[in-house]
Amino acid sequence: MIIMKKAQVTILVIIGLILVALISLSFAFKESILEQAGKFELTKGLAMSTEARRVQSDMKGCVKDVTELGLVVMGLQGGYTAMNPRIQYTTETQTFLNYVPYEGTAYLYFKGQNLVPTKEVMEKQLANFITTYMTACEKEYTDLEVTYGKASNVVGIQKEKITLAVNTDVKVKKGTAENGFKKITLELPVRLGTIQNVADQIIDKQIKVSEDELCVSCIARIASENGMTVDINKLGDNIFYSLNDERSKVVGYEYTFTIANKF
């Protein structure tokens, strides 16, 4: 049997009252604490206002659209979003394969040379495209005052996905209250790393087999081993491979990556 003295009971009661008071105060000042924490970036988004979250959500949706547009252009041009005239294939009239025109597709095989861009080159190409067209995401609001800072981004091309981290400084003001955010992150299930590797394998195999004859079975086998199909088309003296990846969806369609070849 434990016997507690009167003084001990009194101390426990006092401690209990202090705890109750602290809990009550924490609830009373919760909003104020979070607001101050947000200003000093002590919380990871917990203090972001409803208005700032709304702007961030709108901007993230727009950045996704811009990124997908960049991916379509990249697939259309053989891994490039901006083209050097020396590696372009152009025709006087556009020729279409499904929705993809051959106009401007890069030579990734050119008279025995492997010109497939590296993942690092493709990352820079896509990042530059997104940065260039992100101004379209600077939406105006009738009920908010939004200030957009200069944006920079880092693109990561992996086997099964693309990652994007946009560093920005967006301020959102409503009345006297001001909030904001500094980053937008995004992932897209596009197997661009795998596609780049498949293109590289196809061109390497073509060089080993023949520098002036098409190895159709080699191309089909490498594509199939990686869960893709390939269309082969001839236009003039040029041959085009279109790698189709059903597991990579962009704007609701299977992703297509086109390669121009010059024998």
Image (cartoon, helix red, strand yellow):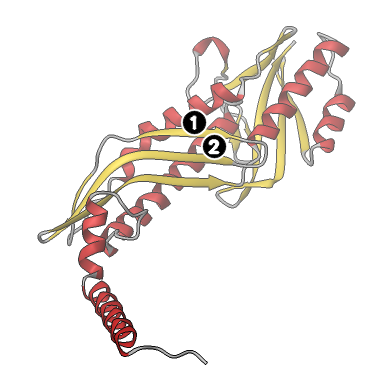
Mark positioned earlier in the residue sequence (1 or 2): 2
| Circle 2: residue type | Leu
Q: Residue at x 31, y 82 (%)?
A: 16
Most foreground residue, 239 or 111 = 111
Name the disc covering residue 46, or none.
none
Distance Cα–Cα, label 1 vs label 2:
7 Å
For the question of whether residue 97 can be seen, the reply is no
Q: Position of residue 59 (x, y in %)?
A: 35, 50
Identify the image quadrant of residue 19. bottom left
Residue under circle 2?
Answer: 71
Which residue is at 36% across, 38% downward? 167
Q: Quadrant of residue 100?
A: top right
Image: 262 above or below 180: above
Q: Quadrant of residue 223?
A: top right
Nearer the camera: disc 1 or disc 2: 1
Q: Which residue is mark 1?
A: 126
Q: Is residue 106 above or below residue 133?
A: above
Q: Is residue 99 visible?
A: yes
Name the element at disc 1: helix
Category of crowding for the residue at label 2, using alpha-carbon neighbours closer than 10 angstroms: few (below 14), some (14–19), many (at least 20): many
Q: Quadrant of the C terminus?
A: top right
Say which of 118 and 38 sits in front.
Answer: 38
Residue 173 falls left or right of residue 104: left
Q: Position of residue 85 (x, y in %)?
A: 50, 12
Residue closer to the observer: 145 or 44: 44
Name the residue at 59% across, 52% down.
Answer: 252
Residue at the extreme left of the image, as rendered: 176
Q: Residue at x 45, y 46 (%)?
A: 185
Mark 1–mark 2 CB contact (< 8 Å):
yes
Residue 68: image x %, image y %?
51, 42
Residue 220 in the image: state x and y as whole percent: 84, 31
Q: Amino acid at mark 1?
A: Leu
